[in-house]
Amino acid sequence: MSYTDRFNIIRTEVPSNVKIVAVSKTKPASSVEELYRNTGHKMFGENKAQELNAKHGVLPMDIEWHFIGHLQTNKIKYIAPYVALIQSVDSFKLLAELNKEAIKCNRVIPCLLQFHIASEEAKFGFSFDEVRQMLEDKLYQQLLNVSITGVMGMATFTDNTRQISSEFKTLFTYFADIKSNYFPLKHDFREVSMGMTDDYKIAIAEGSTIIRVGSGIFGGR
Ligand SMILES: *Cc1c(COP(=O)(O)O)cnc(C)c1O
C-alpha cells in the first residue's frame, strides 16, 4: 500500500476534529512531497532540528512543521523562524531560550508542554508539579513570545492497553487542570497531543486532539 492509501485510511477512521501529524523522521523529503501532492496534507512532524531544516529547505513553504523531539537549546535558532508548533517543551530553560529566539524572529512560537506519563525512565518531560511551579513563576509570566497551546505525552511502550489508557487519562486530567487553573480564558489552549501508530485509537478515546503517526503512514524505520 502507498503512503497515500495508508494516510487516507487513517484520515477516514479518525474523527475530523482530531489533527494528524504525519511523522516523517528518517524518511526522505520525497516521501513528504508525495503525501503532500497526493492528499494536500500539510502537517508533518520531525524530531531532529537538522533533519527538519534540510526538509524545510526543499519542500513547499505552506507545510506546517511540528517539532516533536528533544530540542537542544543551541539548535533552536535554525527552526525558530518557521516552526508551526514545538510539541516537546520539556523544561523552563528551553521555553526561555525559545522565547529569546522568537523575539529575534519577531514572532510568537506556539508550544505544547511535554509531560512524562510513561513508566519508563528515559523519556523526557515535565511532572505536573514542575509545570505548576513554572506557570506560577514571574520568570515564566515574562515570556511573551511563546504561547502554550496545550500538552503532549507518550505512553509506555507496552501492549497492556489498560495501562496506556490510564496514562492518557492522566495526561488529559493534567490538561483540564492546567486549563481551568492557568488558562481559563485562553481559547487557543486546547490541544492534547497523544497517540502514535500503535495507540492512537486509545488516545482518541481518551480525548486526544492531535495524533502523531509515523510508521502507520510511511512504514517501518
Ligand atoms: C517517532 C515518533 C512518533 C511516531 O511514531 P510511530 O510509532 O512511528 O507512529 C510520534 N511521536 C513522537 C514523539 C515520535 O518521536
Image (cartoon, rainbow, N blue to C red):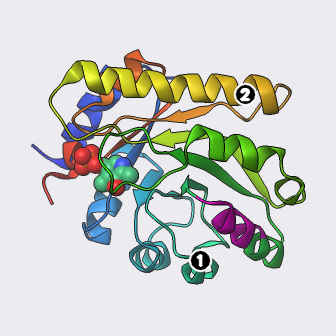
Question: What numbered label is drawn on residue 73?
Answer: 1
Circle nearer the N terminus (2, 1): 1
Residue drawn at 66 percent across, 30 percent down: 190
What predominant SS class does the magenta segment belong to? helix
Residue 18: which numbered mark, if any? none
Q: Amino acid at mark 2?
A: Lys
Name the residue rendered at 74%, 35% in the picture.
188
Q: Does the magenta segment cover residue 45?
A: no
Number of numbered discs: 2
- Residue 33: % across, % down: 34, 62
Give the x, y percent position of residue 54: 42, 80
Instruction: Using the rendered view, name the quadrant where residue 159 is placed.
Output: top left
- Quadrant the C terminus occupies: bottom left
Between 209 and 36, the one lying in front of the other is 209
Q: Which residues are magenta?
A: 91-99
Within-10-Å neighbours for mark 2: few <14, some 14–19, many 20+: some
Instruction: Tell me the kind of residue under disc 1.
Output: Thr
Where is residue 132? Give x, y as percent. 71, 40
Q: Is residue 211 visible?
A: yes
Residue 26, located in which quarter of the rendered image?
bottom left
Q: Quadrant of the N terminus?
A: top left
Residue found at the very far bottom of the displayed protein: 74
Please, what secondary structure does the residue beneath circle 1 have?
Answer: helix
Task: Quote the CA–CA distance across marks 2 and 1.
Answer: 27 Å
User: In the picture provided, is 168 more to the left or to the right than 171?
Assistant: left
**Pointer 2: what residue?**
179
Locate residue 73: give its quadrant: bottom right
